Amino acid sequence: MSMQDSREAAMIGRRTDGTTVRRPLSPHLQVYDMMQMSSLSSILNRITGVAWSAGILLLVWWLVALALGEPAYQTAMGAMSHPLGLLVLAGMTVAAWYHTLAGIRHLNWDIGRGYEIPAMYRSGWAVFIGTAVCSALTWAIALFY
């Protein structure tokens, strides 16, 4: 006789018509529709938050290298000016802008505005377009000024 996992009971549910259904133990990616603005923007907000947090380590490295003197600073700048380093910095720029703009969107929700589906799609698209524009402007300013 095999021992059943005690969590099995929590995975059995009933639909409104009474038929049984096996539910996942907890919501995971299979329950999200990535074509819905709410799901996509929520997951991207989490991903960009993690990316931005990890990217802060580069800023700390650069600041420490700056404090340590010319050889350390040149090493850091060499890594960051390498094509792969520039790609990472560009990704950090996108992550920072997306996370910031999505945070402003969330603050708007915190005051009770923007919950209607059309408003949610408008604000979602505004975050995506704003991220692209702000990232491009950031790099234009960094490269040409």
Image (spheres, rainbow, N blue to C red):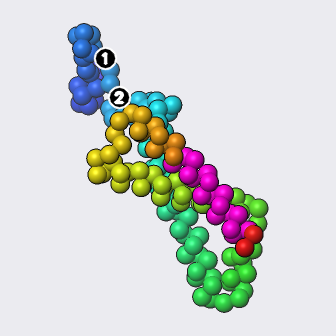
- Residue, disc 2: 24
As displayed, is residue 116 above or below residue 17? below
Residue 28 pos. (x, y %):
41, 35
Residue 81 pos. (x, y %):
74, 69
Q: Residues within 10 Å of mark 2 (few under 14, many from 20)?
A: few
Instruction: Count all numbered tags in the image, as a single digit.
Output: 2
Residue 79 visible to an observer of this rendering: no
Residue 6 visible to an observer of this rendering: yes
The stretch of residues the image draws in magenta is 127-143
**Labelled pair 2, 1 in contact (Cβ < 8 Å):** no
Residue 8 pos. (x, y %):
27, 26
Q: Residues within 10 Å of mark 1 (few under 14, many from 20)?
A: few
Most prominent secondary structure in the magenta stretch?
Answer: helix
Between the C-alphas of marks 2 and 1, the distance is 10 Å
Residue 6 pos. (x, y %):
23, 30
Q: Tag 1, which secondary structure?
A: strand
The picture quadrant where one finds residue 123 is top left
Q: Tag 2, which secondary structure?
A: loop
As displayed, is residue 89 above or below residue 17? below
Asked whether, in this view, residue 59 is left or right of residue 102, the answer is right
Amino acid type for the residue under numbered disc 1: Val
Question: Camera-side residue: 9 or 70?
Answer: 70
Which residue is at 76% across, 66% downward? Answer: 82
Give the numbered dot on residue 21. Answer: 1
Asked whether, in this view, residue 116 is left or right of residue 60, the answer is left
Amino acid type for the residue under numbered disc 2: Pro
As displayed, is residue 65 above or below residue 121? below
Question: Which part of the image, by quadrant, shows the C terminus?
Answer: bottom right
Question: Which part of the image, by quadrant, shows the N terminus?
Answer: top left
